[in-house]
Image (cartoon, rainbow, N blue to C red):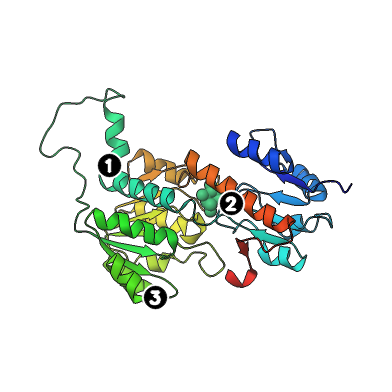
Amino acid sequence: SKPQPLVIVTRRLPEPVETRMRELFSVQFNESDQPFARAELVAAMRSADVFVPTITDRIDASILAEAGPQLRLIANFGNGVDHIDVEAASARGITVTNTPGVLTDDTADMTMALMLAVIRRLPEGARIIPNEEPWTGWSPTWMLGRRITGKRLGIVGMGRIGQALAVRARAFGLSINYHNRRRLPVDTENALEATYWSSLDRMLARMDIISIHCPHTPATYHLLSARRLKLMKRDAVIVNTARGEIIDETALIAMLEADELSGAGLDVFQHHPAVNPRLLRLAKANKVVLLPHMGSATLEGRIDMGEKVMVNIRAFLDGHKPPNRILPSML
Ligand code: 8YV
């Protein structure tokens, strides 16, 4: 009988996902805690029929050139596919899929958490008692943050996550503004009580909080450029749970250092996983809150992502169109 197609997964996954995958497929997991080094990645691409990478694998054209002819599907464990050269994959006849929808709520929750953390000085406050810093007791002028209620939130990228954030932020009394390539249908806009800004520049100039929710594509690389960041109000804050490359990080750092912006909450970094040491200094000075890409990090989310990966693989191997196929034209 024909050997079963080989599925190679580049990272360990939560136990229920691994168990289910072993039931369904002939599957190999990277047994180490570290991502594959280049040579291991190449070896895996040469023998896999189906390849399951994560954000920690750079699947560029040079790696794809090493793929064996049997490799037909890259079923990404994650939503964003900016670490995969989808065009080069498609040119080689390799299908790419992702896991949309299942990390929407978790990412929107974490965005709210990060926003609150920055504006209400949560990490700074939470360190005081455990560190036994001299806590002189309460004073009317002590640890003052800024009020969330009534502030203006500008959402850059109003897809699933942007909209899930809008629902949450509305409940916090924020006014909802958004910029998107396309305006939402008027019913959706009304339901979200959201105001559309066709000009990103004009929205940036008016907002108290900016939150990034677009994918990273060539068109959104440094969308928040030095020029655009300078349009923001001096007392505004910026939150990014999307991709570091969307903000000109060097320009952002310079502005934070010069007090030209009030603060930032960053879950993603331009040179992920390396973090600019100037950001670490800003974190110690309590001007930024830095998270290690935790936006979608819930057990339920990871299990749902695993399910999506399996559905895509199953459909593909059964000769159907996988539900979450990414086409180069979508990027
Ligand atoms: C995942 C993410 O942790 O899905 C995404 O785009 O950034 C994260 O939620 C990561 O992609 C896993 O590969």
Task: Name, please, the residue furthest toward the left.
Answer: 140
The percent coordinates of residue 62 (x first, y second) are 76, 58
CA separation in Å, label 2 and label 1: 37 Å
Decide if residue 261 is in sight here.
no
Give the residue displayed 59% in from the left and 58% down from the top. 81
Q: Is residue 40 above or below residue 250?
A: above
The percent coordinates of residue 169 (x first, y second) are 29, 56
| Residue hosting label 2 | 308
CA separation in Å, label 3 and label 1: 34 Å
Q: Which mark is residue 85?
A: none
Determine whether the residue tagged by mark 1 lies in a helix, strand or loop. Answer: loop
Q: Is residue 101 above or below residue 137?
A: below
Q: Residues within 10 Å of mark 3 (few under 14, many from 20)?
A: some
Task: In this rendered view, identify the residue nearer to me: 216 or 167.
Answer: 167
Left or right: 60 in relation to 306? right
Q: Which mark is residue 121?
A: 1
Give the residue displayed 49% in from the left and 64% down from the top. 222
